[in-house]
Image: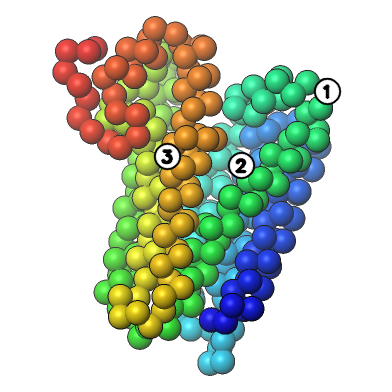
């Protein structure tokens, strides 16, 4: 891949993601429900990565391109439909709601800027998929099977976490309580953990240890970026602040006994 080709790829991905987040902003303005922002982001990122991964080469569309596109399509459909289902029953995402309250009369402009920033930090994710798709190594290889396994484990774990939380909330006896069952007793954010794990599939497929495809190592930026976003920016911090505000000491006790991110056995004697 030439430098000009790589820069052109980055530009194309950036424009597509910016457009997707502009649509997310318009959907938010139209519906007044910020939950649809993440739905639009998920499908927008997925579609961008799929189209870029399937750009034909000299010999047409290769099998590894189809594999990478298929993996990100599975991720996008699962997460996008899950968030859409959740959003259907709420009027606002508490994370965005807190920001809107802080912004006041400047919320339209500030939200647009925020969503364009989201487009920018999503660029490494789309790039990771494309770099995996374009790895010229012989196909199939062990790394392809490993990448598929990683994504399947991640999707299975995230689906389990989502179902456990949904079942807990559906029980009227648990109203106002904190879910600490199943995976949620091992991690306060198991869904975020498995989301990060899934993005390791693409560096696994992209990295070529024989040195013939050095640009493939850049795919590692994808999982690093999503970990940083979820763990330190838009995921864990605002959600934990919301839970502390609404659940108080009950959530503090949960924090004391439960790992914040990596699933670990709950601490004894802190219940």
Quarter occupied by residue 200: bottom left
Question: Which dot marks residue 23?
Answer: none
Q: Position of residue 61 (x, y in %)?
A: 53, 84
* Above-or-below relation of 107 to 148: above
Q: Residue at x 48, y 47 (%)?
A: 226
Residue designated by label 1: 105
Q: Residue at x 35, y 76 (%)?
A: 208
Residue that label 2 marks: 38
Task: Describe residue 70's horizontal placement relative to residue 95 as left or right.
Answer: left
Q: Which of the two residues, 152 or 261, is positioned nearer the viewer here?
A: 261
Q: Is residue 99 above or below residue 235?
A: above
Q: Secondary structure at mark 3?
A: helix
C-alpha span from label 1 to label 3: 32 Å
In front of the other: 5 or 245 = 5
Which is more foreground, mark 1 or mark 3? Answer: 1
Q: Is residue 43 visible?
A: no
Residue nearer the viewer, 193 or 225: 225
The answer to which quarter of the image holds residue 38 is top right
Instruction: Provide residue 162's location: percent of width, then percent of height.
Output: 42, 36
Of tags 2 and 1, which is closer to the observer?
1
Residue positioned 74% across, 55% down in the render: 19
Q: Position of residue 113 (x, y in %)?
A: 74, 41
Q: Earlier in the sequence, mark 2 or mark 3?
A: 2
| Residue 266, visible in the rendered structure | yes
Q: Mark 3 = which residue? A: 192
Within-10-Å neighbours for mark 1: few <14, some 14–19, many 20+: few
Contact (Cβ within 8 Å) of mark 1 with mark 3: no
Q: Earlier in the sequence, mark 1 or mark 3?
A: 1
Task: Identify which residue, 138 or 61, lies in the foreground.
Answer: 138
Q: In which quadrant is the C terminus drawn?
A: top left
In the displayed structure, 244 sits above or below 183; it is above
């Amino acid at each position: 891949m030439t430098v000009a080709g790589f820069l052109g790829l980055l530009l194309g991905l950036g424009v597509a993601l910016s457009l997707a987040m502009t649509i997310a902003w318009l959907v938010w303005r139209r519906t007044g429900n910020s939950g649809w922002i993440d739905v639009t982001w998920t499908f927008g990122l997925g579609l961008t990565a799929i189209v870029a991964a399937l750009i034909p080469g000299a010999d047409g569309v290769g099998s590894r391109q189809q594999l990478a596109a298929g993996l990100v399509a599975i991720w996008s459909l699962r997460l996008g439909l899950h968030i859409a289902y959740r959003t259907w029953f709420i009027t606002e995402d508490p994370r965005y709601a807190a920001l809107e309250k802080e912004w006041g009369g400047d919320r339209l402009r500030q939200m647009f800027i925020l969503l364009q920033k989201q487009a920018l930090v999503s660029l490494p994710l789309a790039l990771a998929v494309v770099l995996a798709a374009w790895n010229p190594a012989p196909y199939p290889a062990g790394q392809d099977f490993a990448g598929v396994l990683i994504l399947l484990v991640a999707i299975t774990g995230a689906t389990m976490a989502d179902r456990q939380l949904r079942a807990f909330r559906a029980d009227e006896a648990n109203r106002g309580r904190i879910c600490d069952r199943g995976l949620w007793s091992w991690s306060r954010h198991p869904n975020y953990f498995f989301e990060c794990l899934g993005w390791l599939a693409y560096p696994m497929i992209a990295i070529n240890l024989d040195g013939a495809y050095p640009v493939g190592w850049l795919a590692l930026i994808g999982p690093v970026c999503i970990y940083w976003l979820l763990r330190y920016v838009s995921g864990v911090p605002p959600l934990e602040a919301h839970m502390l505000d609404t659940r108080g000491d009950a959530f503090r006790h949960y924090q004391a006994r439960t790992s914040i991110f990596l699933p670990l056995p709950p601490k004894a004697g802190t219940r």
